[in-house]
Amino acid sequence: MPVKRRPAKARITNLSDLAFRFFMDEPIADDEKQGFSWYALEWGGEGMLPRYRPAYMWEQHRDELLEEFAEQHPGQRPKYWWTHDAPEPRRKVREGTDPLKPLVIESQASYLKRCGLLLPGEERRLAKVARAREHEAGQSEVDRTN
């Protein structure tokens, strides 16, 4: 199935479209998972000039990427943030000792709120998304009863 490609935002300069989608957890087509650029992103760019290393790119563009990601996914962060920037692990809500009751960890939104990491306006957008989900759930219930 073809992957819908979206150009990087104009405000994020000096960042390739491939790198933008990598950091934003967007799909990357199989034919793009080849060559120098993909190798550098996927394997950390060891032995390469700093500007080709994902850690360097992330450091240079972190704020813009997080702002963009939080706008699209309020209360969440991309995978790269969780592996490189999260100040602590997410807390366990319930231990997973019983196979029928797996480990449950706090939601990303709860974690970000508890750690004071929500961006300006993100909590408002998060509440708006929650209201929309509640409305959809209510509509689904009405549809099932009709």
Image (cartoon, grey):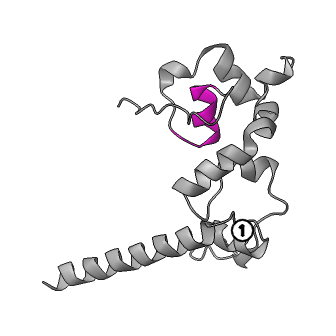
**Residue 4 lies in quadrant:** top left
Q: Is residue 20 above or below residue 67?
A: above
Percent x, y of residue 75 = 61, 65
Percent x, y of residue 30 = 49, 24
Question: Is residue 107 at all visible to an observer of this figure?
Answer: no
Determine crowd level at label 1: few under 14, some 14-19, many 20+ residues with C-alpha closer than 10 A.
some
Dot 1 falls on a residue whose secondary structure is helix
- In-image side of 129 versus 65 (left or right): left
Q: Residue at x 71, y 73 (%)?
A: 113
The N terminus: image quadrant: top left
Q: Residue at x 73, y 22 (%)?
A: 40
Between 98 and 95, which is closer to the camera in this rendering? 95
Q: Residue furthest top?
A: 35
Q: Residue at x 85, y 17 (%)?
A: 49
Between 13 and 137, which is closer to the camera in this rendering? 13
Percent x, y of residue 31 = 49, 19
Q: Residue furthest left?
A: 146
* Residue 109 counted in the magenta span: no
Give the magenta part as a residue range: 16-26
Residue under circle 1? 112
The C terminus: image quadrant: bottom left
- In-image side of 103 versus 74 (left or right): right
Question: Is residue 118 at all visible to an observer of this figure?
Answer: yes
Amino acid on which disc 1 is placed = Leu
Q: Residue furthest front?
A: 11
Percent x, y of residue 46 = 84, 22
